Amino acid sequence: MTHIPFRSVPQSVTEIVAGRIQLMAAAAGSVLGQVRAGQVRALGISGDARMAQMPEAPLLKDQGEPTAGVYAWIGLFAPPGTPPERVARLGMEAGRALSKPETGRALEAAGFEPLGTPPRRADRP
C-alpha cells in the first residue's frame, strides 16, 4: 500500500467514490452517506460491536484482524486556567444536551454513538 496524505477527509471521500483510490480509513460518520448510497463499501469496523447505523459492516476482529477498538470522538476544550466552576458548568450543559433524545438522534444519524464522560483536567488522567 502507498499512504496518500489528503488535506481533508472529504477530499479522500471524493477520491474513493471516484475510484481513484482503493482503500481509506475514516470515522464512520464521514462515509455513512456514501455507504448507504452504495457508492462505497464498508470493509470493516474497528470497534468492539457492530454499528447500528451500518449493521451489515463486519467487525475487523471477526475477520482475524487483531485490533483494539479505534474510536473517533468529539471533545470540548477550554483555555488553560478556566475556573473549575466554569468547566463543571460546561460539562453539565454538555451532559444535558447529550441526554436529549433529539441530540442522540442527530449524532446517530451522523454516524456517532453518543457517550458522555465527566470533564477532567488535562494534566490528570
Image (spheres, rainbow, N blue to C red):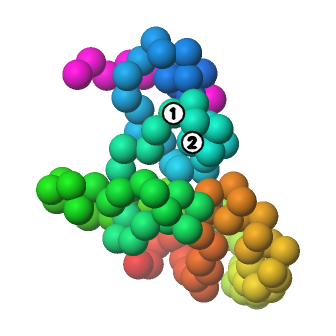
Q: Is residue 65 left or right of residue 5?
A: left
Q: What residue is shown with label 2?
A: 35
Q: Position of residue 84 (x, y in %)?
A: 70, 84
Q: Badge 2: few (under 14), some or many (20 or more) residues near its Cα, within 10 Å?
A: some
The answer to whether residue 94 of the structure is visible from this angle is no
Q: What residue is shown with label 1?
A: 40
Q: Quadrant of residue 125?
A: bottom left
Are dots 2 and 1 in contact, CB under 8 Å? yes
Q: Is residue 99 left or right of residue 76?
A: right
Residue 91's tag is none
Q: Is residue 6 magenta?
A: yes
Is residue 74 shown above or below 120?
above
Foreground: 121 or 90?
Answer: 90
Of the image marks 2 and 1, the number of the one nearer the N terminus: 2
Dominant secondary structure (helix, strand or loop) of the stretch shown in magenta: loop
* Residue at the (44%, 78%) spot, across then down: 124
Q: Badge 1: few (under 14), some or many (20 or more) residues near its Cα, within 10 Å?
A: some
Q: Is residue 94 magenta?
A: no
Q: Position of residue 44 (x, y in %)?
A: 35, 50
* Residue at the (55%, 68%) spot, across then down: 52
Which residues lie in the magenta part?
1-10
Disc 2 is placed on an element classified as: helix
Q: Amino acid at mark 2?
A: Val
Is residue 18 shown above or below 45?
above
* Residue at the (62%, 57%) spot, across then down: 111
Q: Quadrant of residue 78?
A: bottom right
Q: Position of residue 25 (x, y in %)?
A: 41, 39
The answer to whether residue 98 of the structure is visible from this angle is yes
Q: Amino acid at mark 1?
A: Val
Q: CA distance from mark 2 to mark 1?
A: 5 Å
Q: Position of residue 90 (x, y in %)?
A: 77, 78
* Residue at the (76%, 70%) spot, across then down: 105
